Amino acid sequence: AFVYRGNSVDCAAFLVNNDTRKTVVVTFQDSLYELPPKSISILPDCKTVAFNTAKVSTQYNTRAVETSKKLDSIVKWEEYKETIPTFEDTSLRANMLLEHMNTTKDNSDYLWYTFRFQNDFSDAEYVLNVTSSSHVLHAFVNGSFVGSTHGSFKTKTPILESKITLNKGTNYISLLSGMVGLPDSGAYLERRVAGINTVRVKGEHEIKDFTRYSWGYQVGLLGEKLQVYTDSGSNKVKWNTYGSSTHQRLTWYRTLFDAPAGKDPVTLNLESMGKGEAWINGQSIGRYWVSFLTPKGIPSQTRYNVPRSFLKRTDNLLVILEEENGYPLGISIDTISITKVCGHVSESHLPPVISWQGQNKTEHNNSKKHHGRRPKVQLQCPPGRNISRILFASYGNPTGDCENYAIGSCHSFTSLPTIEEACMGKRICTIPVWRKKFGNDPCPGIPKTLLVDA
């Protein structure tokens, strides 16, 4: 128990059960309290439980996605290919491989590593070998993409090995180190490093190590520096018609779209893209990495929230930075709506916490103030919508939950008409889990639960 006291009257307590399996009954200040496994009970007055983390009665919402606008018109998309820098383009130089985070200082996710060398190999085939501590790495030789790799939960130092073609004479290798955020916790945080560790070019008979070599560096992408994702910045570069030239990794795409009608939340569906970042009217809505799949073989996220405050009624500027082979014509603007609300509350649940608000300090010792405080099913629709149909209602011992339910062995036949009377046509309704609300007790001695799906 954790007890906090103010003056002689004020008192609050937290009762904790850390056991992951057993429900326990504890004695606190001469009273008994039941604590479910792995839960915390909050006693605002050190007497009455106002909230338990294992008995949350928040409603369950079912959402529906509606495509408002498919951005599949090829004539409305434009593209700008990011410039691949060479050693001559850089002003920051070092005879070693610099650490990523210390060099970028969080000004960008990206750091270019570039060098040039004379090809005096006698071999016909070459392999570029790079070890890295970055989240992702893209490699370019003489301006052409040759390969990429990325880390994972198990692989902290990914290795890139790609067959490459070298020119006779001078060759340019440009490596883009990318991070997806910075580490912000854990032991020995000051020792965390990122960036490229070693670089080698392997021939059939010899290996050249460029780890200790003359390197040039560029922090960030040129498109970032010019802020091509803004109205003013996008006019600083020459945009071409989508698909007018050979595809290149690291390509910026832009288009215009109108805001969806209504007030429902708006999302950007990036299921067809790979990895990058998206901006709307100059505001970043976040990085995306749709191509990095979960153990189930699916992306962890494909839809990205767009605050309506970011949007204008018409001509919203959408700019995408795509690092891989994403297909922008598959992007859509979607809206999210709540189509069903469900409540599932038992007699053992606690009354709403809001019932504690507004009580003055002189009431703390008044035990009668808790009379009438009962657990309740509270249903609330989004603004502008009302409950139009009750799909299921059972006061008794219904089986299942809000996703899959059925009437149990104990059921009050007044459940449906009682709920319809309380909720139909309303945006918000509250039904106490109380036998008198349903006329009588359908099965005395059995703990009751109320499940409502609307």
Image: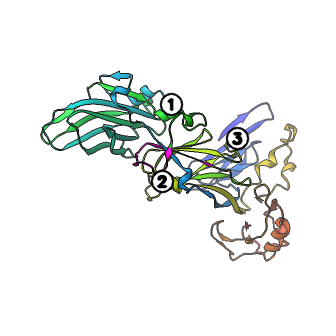
CA distance for labels 1 and 2: 24 Å
Which amino acid, mark 3? Ala
- Is 173 positioned to the left or the right of 431 in the image? left
Q: In this rendered view, identify the residue nearer to me: 387 or 395.
A: 387
Q: Is residue 20 visible?
A: no
Q: Is 251 in the magenta?
A: yes
| Label at residue 13 | 3
Q: Mark 2 points at which residue?
A: 327
* Residue 91 picture location, percent across and down: 39, 22
Residue found 82% across the figure and 54% down from its top: 373
Quadrant for residue 47, please give it: top right
CA distance for labels 3 and 1: 53 Å
In the rendered image of this protein, does residue 11 appear above or below residue 216? below
Magenta segment boundaries in residue numbering:
240-256
On the rendered image, what quadrant is the C terminus found in? bottom right
| Label at residue 225 | 1
The residue tagged with tag 3: helix, strand or loop?
strand
Coloring scheme used = rainbow
Crowding around mark 3 (Cα neighbors within 10 Å: few <14, some 14 to 19, many 20+) is many
Which amino acid, mark 2? Tyr
Which amino acid, mark 1? Lys
Q: Is residue 235 visible?
A: yes
Crowding around mark 2 (Cα neighbors within 10 Å: few <14, some 14 to 19, many 20+) is some
Which of disc 1 and disc 3 is earlier in sequence? Answer: 3
* Residue 272 picture location, percent across and down: 49, 55
